[in-house]
Amino acid sequence: MPQENPTPNKVWYLKHIRLFDDLSPAEMQEMERITRMQEVKKRQPLYFPGDPSSNVYLLKQGRVKIANTAPSGKEVTFDILEPGEVFGELDVLENSPRTTSAEALDDTLVCVIRREDFDRYLTRHPNVTVRLTKLIGLRLKKIQSRVEDLVFRDVPARLAHLLLELRNSDGVAEGTGTRLRVKLTHQEMANLIGCSRETVSTTLGQFRDEGLIHIDGRAITIVNDKGLSRLLR
């Protein structure tokens, strides 16, 4: 009689965090001892700007939005994180209050590490510190690229760039195109590229009519990546 797969434990989840690639079993067990698992309901915040930066978070299940609110009152989304990501670490390393908000977009599962424990772990494991520095650099480069989009590109180019970015990070080859495993709402896309939800919907419709993408509900498949790339020039 077939047995059901056991529920993944904390160590199983930690092994799927990008920061901890190539850790030894002993190092993984040490990390397991200083973390606690926490469930976060959909739309529940994890922290707000100005909050003390007392924890680092490891995203196990669900998605988390990193954002802030502009002086005009409009929300600006910096990133939408998928499982395997670390967040909240930069403020912890700088020992400064939170500069962004973090909100669960789905029912989410995270690992929480206290700042003091995280600092001690990095001191004992410089290889993790090097990897963390690289991940922070990649994230900042991604945010810088998004800011440049807002300044120098029109909405079709910004949306094309976002779709290609999602293809590169989490696309799956399927038939004649690449399906984006990340399923964002039109509002989430709008917050990422600095426009209205209606503009995103209209522009996606144009991309579909031009044969650049295929849309099935919230699922998007890129069928002409060269055509999208031409919009960036």
Image: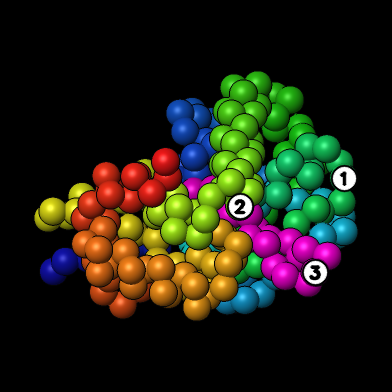
User: Residue placed at 37% from the left, 68% from the top?
Assistant: 204
Give how far apart the Cα atoms at labels 1 and 3 are. 24 Å
Give how far apart the Cα atoms at labels 2 and 1 are. 27 Å
Whether pointer 1 and pointer 3 mark residues with C-beta atoms closer than 8 Å, the reply is: no
**What span is in magenta?**
65-86
Mark 2 belongs to which amino acid? Leu
Mark 1, other Cα within 10 Å: few <14 / some 14–19 / many ≥20 = some
Image position of 92 with respect to 203: above or below: above
**Which mark identifies residue 150?**
2
Compared across the picture, whether 1 is left or right of 199 comes to: left
Compared across the picture, whether 221 is left or right of 42 comes to: left
Whether residue 176 can be seen here? yes
Which residue bears the numbered disc 1?
96
First along the sequence among labels 3 and 2: 3
First along the sequence among labels 1 and 3: 3
Whether pointer 2 and pointer 1 mark residues with C-beta atoms closer than 8 Å, the reply is: no
